[in-house]
Image (spheres, rainbow, N blue to C red):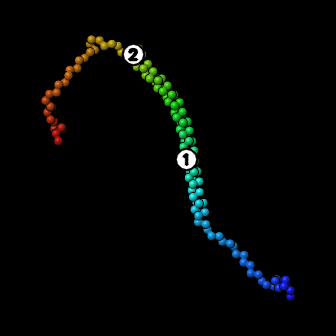
Amino acid sequence: MTGEAFEYAIKKDVRNNPIVREVDEQRHRELWRSTLVGLLFVAVLVFSVWRHVEQLYDGYDMSDLRVKRAVEDQRNRELRNEVEKLRSLQRIEPIARQRLRMGPPGPDDIQVIPRVIEGAPAPRTAVAQR
């Protein structure tokens, strides 16, 4: 046998075990730190956008409320005018004279009610006693 043939006769011990790397603790911490900083940045950004959107919605709501208040103020003025018209004596007097047949009081229509002066208490009755 020659030297070349002998080489193939030796069984080569080849181990194909997977290579296991050691965990680099420093890179692991840096990765977590970067992740947390990124999450904090995203949270601040989302909060800022949320506040801005809420401010826009509140502006729209205020605009709607201003329009509604203007309508209600106009309605209030109309109702006050109507109340004043209904209270006016030029309207009430014809209604009183025609529908209710009222007129100014005459001298016989006036009655004076005497003022009651408190005197001695009324005698007790059997019903009032306890």
- Residue 104 locus on image (x, y percent): 33, 13
Q: Quadrant of residue 52?
A: top right
Instruction: Give the farthest residue toward the front.
Output: 3
SS of the residue at dot 1?
helix
Q: Residue at x 72, y 75 (%)?
A: 16
Residue 2 x, y percent position in the rendering: 86, 86
Q: Is residue 30 visible?
A: yes
Would residue 26 be found to the left or right of residue 85 on screen?
A: right
Q: Residues within 10 Å of mark 1 (few under 14, many from 20)?
A: few
The kind of residue on which mark 1 rests is Phe
Q: Residue at x 51, y 28 (%)?
A: 71
Badge 2 is on which residue?
89
Vertical comparison of 5 with 28: above or below: below
**From what the image shows, is residue 84 above or below residue 37?**
above
Q: Amino acid at mark 2?
A: Leu
Q: Which residue, given by chain and number where applicable, does mark 1 sit on?
A: 47
